[in-house]
Amino acid sequence: MRSRTLTLLAATVGAGLVLSACGANTADSGSGNSSQSAPAPGGAAAGGKVGVILPETATSARWESFDKPFLTKALKDAGFDADVQNAQGDVQKFTTLADGMIAQNVKVLIIAAINGEVGSAVAKKAQAAGIPTIDYDRLNLGGSSDYYVSFDNEKVGQLQGQGLADALKDKKGAEVVMIEGAPTDNNATLFANGQKSVLQPKFASGDLKLVREQAIDNWDNQKGGQTFEQILTDNKGKVDGVVAANDGLAGAVITVLKKNGLNGKVPVTGQDATADGLMAILRGDQYMTVFKPIKEEAEAAAKLAVLLAKGDKAGADALATGKAKDPKGNREVKSVLLEPKLTTKDGVKEVVTQGYVKAAEICGGDLAAACTQLGIS
């Protein structure tokens, strides 16, 4: 396994990122439309325009519900217009959006790419036009962006691995299935590396048994559920724990477990602290998720973009104190790497308190009593 090369963000950066309440963790019906913040009174914002391209909405509500409004607000507050658009999982649309932003001569381009290939191509084209680029959330391997903003993604995987190990600590030889994210997404690779840094020694010792590990193209939840169901069938209906790389895949796994009367008996991991994931945790169907305060990520990216737009490379370097390794490009990328949090049932209240999910979204019906017990309101 590749050695861990990510370095946590310096405390001074974290101090500058302040959490506040935000909107609900659900994408509205119009989330596929491109969006641009309103210009300052009297015309365009004084700082100019920063372009942001987000990847999709099919597998995660976060891009439209959180990243888009947080990035827009942070850039607007700094005196810049934010042209935040979503490629809806379409590589050609991603390229077309980028071409349009480059033609408009945006000051900086923030890229959350569908895959590393298109992300790298867009960065190269933007930089040829003299536009600085930032890889956002996902590092584009073999790319050329000088900066990267994300969470410590190997740490995300470590938290998932540790969560499952904790849940199975009294069940020696427990049989584990690992349902991973897209093989073309470097983050998915880092999650898997982090998971295995915790679980591989347990597989080697016999404390746990790996049934199968399978990556899921495009983070496709439906395909993830179908794949897990086939693995479960091949293993004669036997499973004791599931590593699911995010809450969407976890939900697909739980659907299969329900069909087989195993939900609530088999711990399942997740990531993103979505409303659906948190409800599954409250019901006991999902053991844990990884909470990533996206407001911190968006604000860090916006702050970095503002520095680059103003030509303050020294300031940008002072902010990006971490490093992420790009093995394909044989380089280290200056990074802002934020700290994720393992969240079990007792931690759901924190996600609500910080405003990432509203109590009304997760506490209705059969979950009202659980929320009352945990003080969630």
Image (cartoon, grey):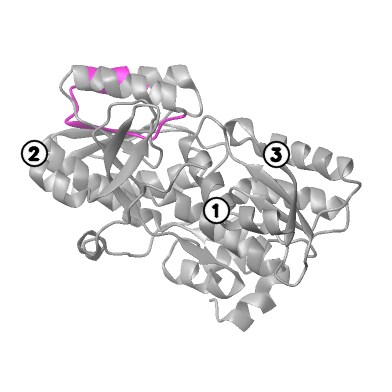
The circle on residue 224 is: 3
Q: Which residue type does callout 3 highlight?
A: Gly
Residue 44 x, y percent position in the rendering: 14, 34
The part of the chain drawn in magenta is 97-114
Please say whether residue 247 is one of the residues in the magenta stretch: no
Q: Look at 68% across and 47% down and name the residue there.
A: 178
| Mark 1 residue crowding within 10 angstroms, few (<14) / some (14–19) / many (20+) | many
Q: CA distance from mark 1 to mark 3?
A: 23 Å
Residue 298 vs residue 237, the one in the foreground: 237
Number of other residues with Cα within 10 Å of mark 3, as a class: few under 14, some 14 to 19, many 20 or more:
many
Callout in the foreground (2, 1): 1
Q: Badge 1 is on which residue?
A: 197
* Residue 323 falls in image quadrant: top left
The residue closer to the viewer here, 119 or 205, is 205
On the image, numbered disc 2 is attached to which residue?
A: 310
Decide which of tag 2 and tag 1 comes sooner along the chain.
Answer: 1
Residue drawn at the location 49% of the way across and 37% of the way down = 30
